[in-house]
Amino acid sequence: MNRKTIGCMLAGMICLASFLICGSPAFGQTPDNIKESVADQIERATNKVNQKQTYQLAYKLKKGEEIRWDFEQVVSTKFQMAGEVEESSSRSENTKLWKVVNVDQLGNMTFAYTIESVKMWTKVGDENPVSFDSETDKDVPEVYSGTAENVGNTLAIFSISPNGTILDRKSSLKEDVFGIGKVTIPLPEKAVPVGFKWDVPIVLSANDEQGTKKLKARILYELASVKDQNAYIRFRTEVLTPVTSEKIRSTIMQKMTKGIVVFDMERGCPILQRMEWDEKAQGFEGPDSYLKYVARMSEKIISADDPRNQKNTSALSPVKEDIATKPVEVKTLEGKPVMRK
Protein backbone atom coordinates (compact mmCIF):
# COMPACT_ATOMS: atom_id res chain seq x y z
CA MET A 1 0.00 0.00 0.00
CA ASN A 2 1.27 3.42 -0.78
CA ARG A 3 1.54 6.24 1.70
CA LYS A 4 -1.65 7.88 0.47
CA THR A 5 -3.72 4.72 0.97
CA ILE A 6 -2.34 4.19 4.49
CA GLY A 7 -3.19 7.82 5.33
CA CYS A 8 -6.77 7.36 4.19
CA MET A 9 -7.11 4.18 6.23
CA LEU A 10 -5.76 5.89 9.39
CA ALA A 11 -8.10 8.82 8.90
CA GLY A 12 -11.03 6.44 8.57
CA MET A 13 -10.03 4.57 11.73
CA ILE A 14 -9.75 7.82 13.69
CA CYS A 15 -13.21 8.88 12.55
CA LEU A 16 -14.64 5.48 13.49
CA ALA A 17 -12.95 5.58 16.92
CA SER A 18 -14.29 9.06 17.57
CA PHE A 19 -17.77 7.93 16.49
CA LEU A 20 -17.65 4.94 18.88
CA ILE A 21 -16.30 6.97 21.80
CA CYS A 22 -18.84 9.77 21.44
CA GLY A 23 -21.69 7.36 20.88
CA SER A 24 -23.88 6.86 17.87
CA PRO A 25 -27.16 8.74 17.40
CA ALA A 26 -28.32 6.10 14.93
CA PHE A 27 -30.86 4.66 17.38
CA GLY A 28 -32.39 8.01 18.37
CA GLN A 29 -30.03 8.51 21.32
CA THR A 30 -28.89 12.10 21.90
CA PRO A 31 -25.75 12.53 24.02
CA ASP A 32 -26.30 14.22 27.39
CA ASN A 33 -23.72 16.90 26.69
CA ILE A 34 -25.61 17.85 23.51
CA LYS A 35 -28.88 17.94 25.45
CA GLU A 36 -27.35 20.26 28.04
CA SER A 37 -25.88 22.46 25.37
CA VAL A 38 -29.24 22.83 23.65
CA ALA A 39 -30.95 23.55 26.97
CA ASP A 40 -28.37 26.22 27.74
CA GLN A 41 -28.90 27.77 24.34
CA ILE A 42 -32.68 27.82 24.83
CA GLU A 43 -32.28 29.40 28.28
CA ARG A 44 -29.97 32.08 26.91
CA ALA A 45 -32.35 32.79 24.05
CA THR A 46 -35.28 33.00 26.48
CA ASN A 47 -33.39 35.41 28.69
CA LYS A 48 -32.63 37.62 25.70
CA VAL A 49 -36.29 37.65 24.72
CA ASN A 50 -37.32 38.46 28.29
CA GLN A 51 -34.89 41.34 28.41
CA LYS A 52 -36.47 42.86 25.29
CA GLN A 53 -40.06 42.03 26.20
CA THR A 54 -41.89 44.32 28.60
CA TYR A 55 -44.50 43.42 31.20
CA GLN A 56 -47.32 45.46 32.68
CA LEU A 57 -47.66 44.90 36.42
CA ALA A 58 -50.97 46.12 37.81
CA TYR A 59 -53.55 45.32 40.47
CA LYS A 60 -56.82 44.04 39.00
CA LEU A 61 -58.99 43.31 42.02
CA LYS A 62 -62.68 42.69 41.29
CA LYS A 63 -65.64 44.06 43.20
CA GLY A 64 -66.98 41.45 45.62
CA GLU A 65 -63.76 39.45 45.47
CA GLU A 66 -62.43 37.98 48.71
CA ILE A 67 -58.70 37.33 48.89
CA ARG A 68 -57.14 35.46 51.79
CA TRP A 69 -53.54 34.89 52.78
CA ASP A 70 -51.81 32.53 55.15
CA PHE A 71 -49.26 34.50 57.14
CA GLU A 72 -46.42 32.99 59.16
CA GLN A 73 -43.52 34.64 60.96
CA VAL A 74 -40.82 33.08 63.12
CA VAL A 75 -38.44 35.25 65.16
CA SER A 76 -35.41 34.45 67.29
CA THR A 77 -33.42 37.01 69.29
CA LYS A 78 -30.37 36.92 71.54
CA PHE A 79 -29.81 39.84 73.91
CA GLN A 80 -26.70 40.27 76.06
CA MET A 81 -25.87 43.05 78.51
CA ALA A 82 -23.80 43.34 81.71
CA GLY A 83 -23.03 39.64 81.63
CA GLU A 84 -26.67 38.64 81.39
CA VAL A 85 -27.95 36.77 78.34
CA GLU A 86 -31.58 36.45 77.34
CA GLU A 87 -32.83 34.51 74.36
CA SER A 88 -36.35 34.65 73.02
CA SER A 89 -38.31 33.08 70.21
CA SER A 90 -41.79 33.50 68.82
CA ARG A 91 -44.07 32.22 66.14
CA SER A 92 -47.15 33.83 64.65
CA GLU A 93 -49.69 32.47 62.17
CA ASN A 94 -52.81 34.20 60.96
CA THR A 95 -55.32 34.35 58.15
CA LYS A 96 -55.76 37.73 56.49
CA LEU A 97 -58.64 38.82 54.33
CA TRP A 98 -59.12 41.54 51.74
CA LYS A 99 -62.75 42.05 50.76
CA VAL A 100 -63.05 44.24 47.67
CA VAL A 101 -65.99 46.58 48.14
CA ASN A 102 -65.64 48.78 45.06
CA VAL A 103 -63.78 49.30 41.79
CA ASP A 104 -64.31 52.64 40.03
CA GLN A 105 -64.14 53.53 36.33
CA LEU A 106 -60.43 54.37 36.59
CA GLY A 107 -59.66 50.94 38.00
CA ASN A 108 -59.06 52.24 41.54
CA MET A 109 -59.94 49.56 44.08
CA THR A 110 -61.29 49.79 47.63
CA PHE A 111 -61.02 46.87 50.01
CA ALA A 112 -61.61 46.10 53.68
CA TYR A 113 -58.77 44.50 55.63
CA THR A 114 -59.40 41.92 58.36
CA ILE A 115 -57.47 39.37 60.39
CA GLU A 116 -59.78 36.38 60.68
CA SER A 117 -57.77 34.16 63.03
CA VAL A 118 -54.41 34.02 64.81
CA LYS A 119 -52.14 31.47 66.42
CA MET A 120 -49.31 32.91 68.48
CA TRP A 121 -46.53 31.52 70.65
CA THR A 122 -43.75 33.27 72.57
CA LYS A 123 -40.96 32.18 74.89
CA VAL A 124 -38.69 34.71 76.63
CA GLY A 125 -35.64 33.49 78.55
CA ASP A 126 -36.44 30.84 81.15
CA GLU A 127 -40.08 31.83 81.41
CA ASN A 128 -42.79 29.38 80.42
CA PRO A 129 -44.01 29.75 76.81
CA VAL A 130 -47.16 31.77 76.23
CA SER A 131 -49.54 30.81 73.44
CA PHE A 132 -52.92 31.78 72.05
CA ASP A 133 -55.20 30.33 69.36
CA SER A 134 -58.16 32.56 68.57
CA GLU A 135 -60.20 29.64 67.24
CA THR A 136 -59.88 27.38 70.32
CA ASP A 137 -58.77 29.41 73.36
CA LYS A 138 -61.29 31.28 75.52
CA ASP A 139 -58.71 32.75 77.87
CA VAL A 140 -56.45 35.37 76.31
CA PRO A 141 -52.94 35.93 77.72
CA GLU A 142 -52.32 39.57 78.57
CA VAL A 143 -49.51 39.88 76.03
CA TYR A 144 -52.00 39.01 73.25
CA SER A 145 -55.02 40.94 74.53
CA GLY A 146 -54.70 43.71 71.95
CA THR A 147 -54.39 41.24 69.10
CA ALA A 148 -57.33 39.16 70.30
CA GLU A 149 -59.62 42.20 70.40
CA ASN A 150 -58.95 42.89 66.74
CA VAL A 151 -59.52 39.38 65.39
CA GLY A 152 -62.60 39.25 63.18
CA ASN A 153 -63.02 43.03 63.03
CA THR A 154 -62.50 45.21 59.99
CA LEU A 155 -59.24 46.96 60.84
CA ALA A 156 -58.89 49.21 57.82
CA ILE A 157 -60.27 50.36 54.50
CA PHE A 158 -57.80 51.08 51.73
CA SER A 159 -58.31 52.59 48.30
CA ILE A 160 -55.48 51.89 45.88
CA SER A 161 -54.64 52.70 42.27
CA PRO A 162 -53.75 49.97 39.76
CA ASN A 163 -50.03 50.50 40.48
CA GLY A 164 -50.55 50.01 44.22
CA THR A 165 -50.46 53.65 45.32
CA ILE A 166 -52.61 54.15 48.43
CA LEU A 167 -55.16 56.84 47.55
CA ASP A 168 -57.18 56.76 50.75
CA ARG A 169 -56.82 55.07 54.11
CA LYS A 170 -59.03 54.66 57.16
CA SER A 171 -57.17 52.64 59.71
CA SER A 172 -56.16 52.36 63.34
CA LEU A 173 -53.04 50.41 62.46
CA LYS A 174 -49.76 52.09 63.27
CA GLU A 175 -48.12 50.33 60.38
CA ASP A 176 -49.93 49.20 57.24
CA VAL A 177 -47.37 46.52 56.62
CA PHE A 178 -48.05 43.87 54.01
CA GLY A 179 -44.48 42.81 54.62
CA ILE A 180 -42.39 45.28 52.70
CA GLY A 181 -43.39 48.73 53.82
CA LYS A 182 -47.05 49.27 52.90
CA VAL A 183 -50.19 47.20 52.59
CA THR A 184 -49.60 46.99 48.83
CA ILE A 185 -46.54 46.53 46.65
CA PRO A 186 -45.68 49.65 44.61
CA LEU A 187 -45.53 48.79 40.91
CA PRO A 188 -44.13 50.66 37.89
CA GLU A 189 -46.73 52.73 36.06
CA LYS A 190 -45.66 51.50 32.62
CA ALA A 191 -44.58 48.16 31.17
CA VAL A 192 -41.01 47.22 32.11
CA PRO A 193 -38.49 44.54 31.05
CA VAL A 194 -36.86 41.88 33.23
CA GLY A 195 -34.04 43.51 35.16
CA PHE A 196 -35.87 46.81 35.60
CA LYS A 197 -35.38 48.43 39.03
CA TRP A 198 -37.45 50.98 40.87
CA ASP A 199 -37.44 52.30 44.42
CA VAL A 200 -39.62 53.98 47.00
CA PRO A 201 -38.02 56.49 49.39
CA ILE A 202 -38.76 56.00 53.09
CA VAL A 203 -37.62 57.54 56.37
CA LEU A 204 -36.56 55.35 59.29
CA SER A 205 -36.71 56.52 62.89
CA ALA A 206 -33.78 55.45 65.04
CA ASN A 207 -32.38 56.29 68.46
CA ASP A 208 -28.86 56.93 69.67
CA GLU A 209 -27.26 58.65 72.67
CA GLN A 210 -28.32 62.08 71.35
CA GLY A 211 -31.96 61.15 70.81
CA THR A 212 -34.16 60.30 67.84
CA LYS A 213 -32.65 60.36 64.36
CA LYS A 214 -34.31 60.33 60.96
CA LEU A 215 -32.53 58.19 58.40
CA LYS A 216 -33.05 58.44 54.67
CA ALA A 217 -33.66 55.03 53.15
CA ARG A 218 -35.39 53.34 50.27
CA ILE A 219 -36.92 50.03 49.34
CA LEU A 220 -35.33 48.88 46.10
CA TYR A 221 -37.33 46.58 43.82
CA GLU A 222 -36.23 44.60 40.78
CA LEU A 223 -38.23 42.55 38.28
CA ALA A 224 -35.99 39.50 38.54
CA SER A 225 -37.80 37.15 36.16
CA VAL A 226 -41.13 36.25 34.59
CA LYS A 227 -42.49 32.73 34.22
CA ASP A 228 -46.00 31.43 33.51
CA GLN A 229 -47.57 34.89 33.98
CA ASN A 230 -45.89 35.23 37.38
CA ALA A 231 -43.54 38.15 37.96
CA TYR A 232 -40.78 37.52 40.50
CA ILE A 233 -39.89 40.77 42.24
CA ARG A 234 -36.86 41.01 44.51
CA PHE A 235 -36.68 43.76 47.12
CA ARG A 236 -34.44 45.00 49.91
CA THR A 237 -34.19 47.96 52.27
CA GLU A 238 -31.21 50.24 51.73
CA VAL A 239 -30.23 52.89 54.29
CA LEU A 240 -28.81 55.91 52.47
CA THR A 241 -27.79 57.88 55.58
CA PRO A 242 -24.45 56.51 56.88
CA VAL A 243 -24.97 54.41 60.03
CA THR A 244 -21.92 54.63 62.28
CA SER A 245 -23.60 53.94 65.64
CA GLU A 246 -24.34 50.42 66.84
CA LYS A 247 -27.12 51.96 68.94
CA ILE A 248 -28.84 53.11 65.77
CA ARG A 249 -28.23 49.75 64.13
CA SER A 250 -29.92 47.98 67.05
CA THR A 251 -33.10 50.04 66.64
CA ILE A 252 -33.59 49.60 62.89
CA MET A 253 -32.71 45.93 62.39
CA GLN A 254 -36.37 44.86 62.22
CA LYS A 255 -36.85 47.27 59.31
CA MET A 256 -33.94 45.91 57.27
CA THR A 257 -35.98 43.67 55.01
CA LYS A 258 -35.09 41.62 51.97
CA GLY A 259 -37.02 39.02 50.06
CA ILE A 260 -39.10 38.21 47.02
CA VAL A 261 -42.70 38.70 45.90
CA VAL A 262 -44.48 36.59 43.30
CA PHE A 263 -47.06 38.71 41.49
CA ASP A 264 -49.71 37.00 39.35
CA MET A 265 -49.98 39.34 36.35
CA GLU A 266 -53.16 37.73 35.03
CA ARG A 267 -54.99 37.85 38.34
CA GLY A 268 -53.49 41.23 39.22
CA CYS A 269 -52.50 40.34 42.76
CA PRO A 270 -49.46 39.14 44.74
CA ILE A 271 -49.77 35.43 45.51
CA LEU A 272 -46.64 34.83 47.57
CA GLN A 273 -43.96 36.74 49.39
CA ARG A 274 -41.03 35.70 51.52
CA MET A 275 -38.76 37.79 53.68
CA GLU A 276 -35.84 37.15 55.98
CA TRP A 277 -33.73 39.02 58.50
CA ASP A 278 -30.29 38.24 59.91
CA GLU A 279 -29.04 41.32 61.75
CA LYS A 280 -26.77 41.95 64.72
CA ALA A 281 -25.43 44.87 66.77
CA GLN A 282 -22.39 44.77 69.05
CA GLY A 283 -21.57 47.34 71.73
CA PHE A 284 -24.74 49.44 71.51
CA GLU A 285 -25.06 49.67 75.34
CA GLY A 286 -21.54 49.10 76.58
CA PRO A 287 -18.72 46.97 75.20
CA ASP A 288 -20.28 43.62 76.12
CA SER A 289 -23.78 44.38 74.83
CA TYR A 290 -24.94 42.28 71.91
CA LEU A 291 -28.20 41.83 70.03
CA LYS A 292 -28.91 39.35 67.25
CA TYR A 293 -32.19 39.27 65.35
CA VAL A 294 -33.02 36.37 63.02
CA ALA A 295 -36.44 36.01 61.43
CA ARG A 296 -38.32 34.75 58.42
CA MET A 297 -41.76 35.58 57.15
CA SER A 298 -43.93 34.08 54.45
CA GLU A 299 -47.32 35.04 53.14
CA LYS A 300 -49.13 33.04 50.47
CA ILE A 301 -52.53 33.31 48.89
CA ILE A 302 -55.16 30.71 49.81
CA SER A 303 -56.60 28.92 46.80
CA ALA A 304 -60.24 29.46 45.85
CA ASP A 305 -61.21 25.86 46.65
CA ASP A 306 -59.70 25.94 50.15
CA PRO A 307 -62.40 25.47 52.84
CA ARG A 308 -61.22 28.66 54.54
CA ASN A 309 -62.58 30.60 51.59
CA GLN A 310 -66.10 29.42 52.44
CA LYS A 311 -66.25 31.48 55.62
CA ASN A 312 -69.18 33.82 56.03
CA THR A 313 -67.81 37.33 55.72
CA SER A 314 -71.07 39.20 55.26
CA ALA A 315 -70.43 41.01 58.54
CA LEU A 316 -67.28 42.55 57.09
CA SER A 317 -68.40 45.92 55.85
CA PRO A 318 -66.63 49.19 55.11
CA VAL A 319 -65.13 50.81 58.19
CA LYS A 320 -67.35 53.10 60.18
CA GLU A 321 -66.18 56.58 61.11
CA ASP A 322 -65.18 55.35 64.56
CA ILE A 323 -63.14 52.47 63.16
CA ALA A 324 -61.15 50.65 65.79
CA THR A 325 -60.24 53.31 68.32
CA LYS A 326 -57.67 51.05 69.96
CA PRO A 327 -54.49 50.71 67.87
CA VAL A 328 -52.56 47.50 67.43
CA GLU A 329 -49.59 47.52 69.79
CA VAL A 330 -46.16 47.15 68.24
CA LYS A 331 -43.35 45.77 70.36
CA THR A 332 -39.99 47.51 69.91
CA LEU A 333 -36.44 46.73 70.84
CA GLU A 334 -36.71 49.07 73.82
CA GLY A 335 -38.96 46.49 75.45
CA LYS A 336 -38.59 42.77 75.84
CA PRO A 337 -37.69 41.03 72.59
CA VAL A 338 -41.22 39.79 72.03
CA MET A 339 -42.52 39.54 68.52
CA ARG A 340 -44.62 42.41 67.22
CA LYS A 341 -48.35 41.85 66.98
Image (spheres, helix red, strand yellow):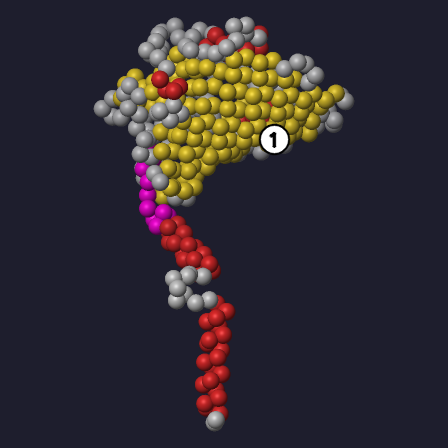
Q: Where does the magenta region start and end?
A: 49-58
The location of residue 262, given as percent across then percent down, is 41, 34
In this view, which residue lies farthest toward the left? 105
Q: Is residue 250 visible?
A: no
Give, as a three-letter code, the residue at label 1.
Glu
As for residue 57 lying within the magenta part, the answer is yes
Q: Which is more toward the observer, 285 or 225? A: 225
Residue drawn at 46 percent across, 15 percent down: 117
Q: Is residue 316 visible?
A: yes
The location of residue 138, given as percent across then percent down, is 52, 5
Q: Which is more toward the observer, 20 or 203? A: 20
Residue drawn at 42 percent across, 61 percent down: 30
The location of residue 171, given as percent across then percent down, is 41, 14
Say which element carries label 1.
strand
Q: Which residue is mark 1?
A: 279
Locate residue 292 relative to residue 38 in the image: left or right: right
Residue drawn at 51 percent across, 27 percent down: 297
